[in-house]
Amino acid sequence: MEWEYDVVVIGTGTAGTDIAAHCRKAGKSVAIADYRRFGGTCALWGCIPKKVLGAAAEVVARAGDLHGKGIVGKAAIDWPALMAFEHTFTDPVPGSKEEYFRKTGIDAYHGRARFTGEQTVEVGGETLRGMHIVVATGAKPRPVHVPGADLMTTSSEFLYLQNLPKRIVFIGGGYISFEFAHVAARAGAEATILQRSGRVLKQFDPDLVDRLITASDEAGIAVRLNMPLKSIEQTDGGLLVRAGDAGEHTFEADMVVHGVGRVPETEGLDLAKGGIETDRKGIVVNEYLQSVSNSAVYVAGDANPTGIQLTPVATIDAHTVVDNILNGNTRKADYSLVPSAVFTVPALAAVGLSEEAAKKKGVEYDLHSGDMSSWYASRRIGLAHAVYKLLLEKETGRILGAHVLGDNAGEIINLFSLAIRQNLTADDLTYDTMLYAYPTSTYEITYMVKGKGS
């Protein structure tokens, strides 16, 4: 049977659901399809469950930091109980999505979608014809081509472990490895991060990253640089990881976690049958997130190779695609100011220009930087590692970039993101100009803009 729709969306994550909802609200007939549980990465295999685990890790870290400062005893994580709590967040998602689609008149299909023509996809034996088709299929772990790669545990699987192994090796020095290693270490596991190059968390300021590595080491996490993965072997005692240029370094583990990044999940879509051009990164799109070879097709969220794999970016992609479907190509994708955070303990966050980027662009700036560990917000919780950097335009004092390692770094960076978006200067954020609730972490922005600790 063949169905006619104004919009067919493939994927039920943040981007796919948003696009389906807004197009339906605008009076369009909409179908949505997914072969996985409805809900997408953020709700089921990413942000939400990750933050639930991270909250428990933070409690353990806080108790340890305040030991001898009024706190006695040791906090500990009951992993099965924590998993049960996590499930209270994730288990309701697929059903609620299904009910939402039903109530709003969005036709939902379960099964893998594949293109059968430029404006048709087949799902579960049914052909869906759409005036527009949106690929919002999310991402999958980047393929790793070494012997034993199939022995790795994915980040999705890690989030649903019924029992936490004692020895865990994380491959790759990005968000996934650091965030999960901080959870694992606080839950009592021996955590090791292996990074193929000499730098981890490359999207962030290297000085702040170095401080996070120190904090990680103190939490019992071993960060090993210049350790390219060579192989993983099954042994009687678990797994043996070989790393280094010649595989000369070995690490024993009970679990090896894939943390080397994710790529758009477009395999199996039969893109060629849809006349959809691809390159090594994925579907080739224009500035409107439209396929360059098939104008009926748009791409959004983690499936979009030109974007950044973050949930707020998926939302921006969704709004861009909706505007372009409803109004013609009127809105271009804009990733010029994207705040990001690594939810370790302490957290690391950034927005705007880095020193490296400013120098490459020839931007003249003043640098405010300093150690915040003695400031109230850090000292009251016993946080030993808290630092910041601000880049201010030399002539105007306009805020160009902000980098924070510390408590509530993600919340602080959101305010700096707003300040940059609104072209605010350092003077605009001082306590002479703006009132803050006190004492709070965000009040200390007033010290940062004045260059305290520089």
Image (cartoon, rainbow, N blue to C red):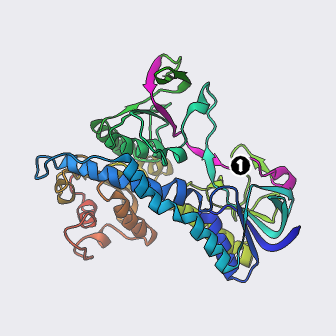
Whether residue 225 is situated above or below residue 442 in the rendered picture: above
Q: Is residue 271 visible?
A: yes
Give the residue type at disc 1.
Answer: Gly
Instruction: Give the image location of residue 7, x and y in percent.
Output: 76, 71
Instruction: Specify few, some or many for label 1: CA neighbours under 10 Å numbering under 14, 14-19, or 20 or more.
Output: some
To which residue does mark 1 refer?
282
In the rendering, at what x and y percent does residue 48 appear? Answer: 47, 59
Would you say residue 258 sits in the magenta stretch? yes
The picture places residue 269, in percent across and down from the top left corner, at 77, 52
- Dividing the image into 4 quarters, which one contains the N terminus? bottom right
Q: Examine the rendered structure and indicate whether residue 162 appears above or below residue 124.
A: above
Q: Does residue 334 appear in this view? A: no
* Residue appearing at x 69%, y 77% in the figure: 23
Residue pictured at 60% horizontal, 56% vertical = 307
> Is residue 10 a member of the stretch shown in magenta?
no
The span shown in magenta is 249-276
Is 294 situated left or right of 283 in this image?
right
